[in-house]
Image (cartoon, rainbow, N blue to C red):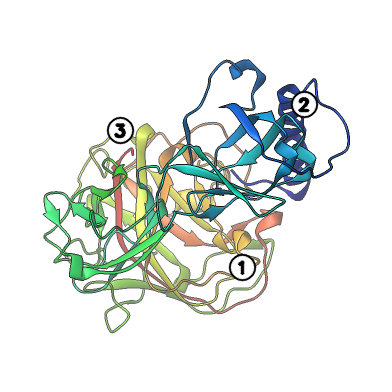
Amino acid sequence: MKYNIYSKKLFAFLLFTVTLVSFVACDDDNKGKYEMTDGVPTIYYIRPPDVEKADSLLVGAYMGETICLVGDNLTSIQELYFNDIKALLNINFITKNTLLVTVPKDVPNEKIDKMVMVLKSGERVEYDFIVRIPAPEVASIKCEQVPEGEDVVLYGDYFFDNQTVPLTIVIGDYIVPKSDIVDIQKTQVTFKSPVMDVKGTISMTTAYGNSGRTKFVFHDDRGILFNFDDYPIVPGWGRPNLIETGPDAISGNYMKFRGELQAGEWVSPGDNYQCNFWGEDNGVSTGNLFPSDPAISILKFEINVLEAWSALPMNIFFGPQDSQESALWDDSVPRAQWIPWKETGGSYITDGWVTISIPIADFKLSGSGENMKKIPEHFGSLNMYIYNRGRADAVGTDCSPVILIDNVRVVPGE
């Protein structure tokens, strides 16, 4: 979900308000200005800040969780560590009898399962408390179709390596060799791709648990409509006029969109920015181009933008068999409009090949971008164009992009 500036400010205000209310509930009986004190603190117990969960006593918490310390003379705490990671203390959330703090998100160098309080005097006081580290979460992948030996990039969180229990990646039944994992960061892992025959969902294991299987499939070969190699496009009007291969290829041939794009409010597609795929001309004589249920399926393709794209949307729509170009001029045909340059500051360029996923449930816009609240009725042809049919917020600026596209496919819902 995207938020505008007003929404972000409103969300931040509401979040602060909820936190403040929780703190007040945590400390109804202790009001007054903060003042650091001498002496030693006493912790009676630790609980969640939510007043509705005040009876739940905690012996541990996950990284990033907020907790409420309840005790006496807590204003004597000058610094607070969880294991060996320093927490951020806010004096507005500290009173004599309560202290509200968020468990740090960094992994400790030494896990002693203790909270360490550093006092005004410099004395250190320990309290048993377990920082629970979540299992890894694999959220997405940069590109699903990575050739052998090239870099595969996974995104997510809690990607932690450990000398005793090293981070492990599994694709289907294939275990990625440790030597092929070239970079591990908390939210990103890079490894060398195995051969294309190795395919399947991905799971990751660390010392703190297993991610479970991803919904996406690495090296997915389901539902391919055209990849410009095994599934060529029969020549004719509206077909791509440049299919080539070369050092920029992900594998074999690709389609290239290129040339000048003028930022007009109503611009027809030029020959360099259109691709039509009709089933009856390409081995699918009747019915849908793909076997899965359209309502819960996803259109995917790989794209590599070599020269910046900053004008007009990519219109993608399905139609019946033998629809020819009629849907091109019918603005009432439900479609998807992909406009990545709007989300990246007005210009879009990729760092190599990336996978684009668009649920067919999102194919419900008119040519001018209005929500038609319905998806297409027919799936016997597929049309991809970069052009504008009157969408005022997708004009952009003049540009001369170079856009490579490959492996257009429809897969079951994830």
Q: Is residue 412 visible?
A: yes
Q: CA distance from mark 2 to mark 3?
A: 51 Å
Q: Nearer the viewer, mark 2 or mark 3?
A: 2
Per the image, the residue denoted by label 2 is 24
Task: Tell me the tag on residue 311.
Answer: 1
In the image, residue 110 above or below residue 25: below
Frontmost residue, 56 versus 76: 76
Q: Residues within 10 Å of mark 1 (few under 14, many from 20)?
A: many
Secondary structure type for disc 3: loop
Task: Tell me the tag on residue 293.
Answer: 3
Frontmost residue, 162 versus 273: 162
* Residue 219 placement (x, y as % from top left): 22, 57
Q: Earlier in the sequence, mark 2 or mark 1?
A: 2
Give the amino acid type for the residue marked by disc 1 in the picture: Ala
Q: Residues within 10 Å of mark 3 (few under 14, many from 20)?
A: some
Q: Residue at x 20, y 47 (%)?
A: 284
Task: Tell me the tag on residue 98.
Answer: none
> Decide: marks 2, 1 in contact (CB < 8 A)?
no
Frontmost residue, 391 versus 99: 99
Give the amino acid type for the residue marked by disc 3 in the picture: Asp
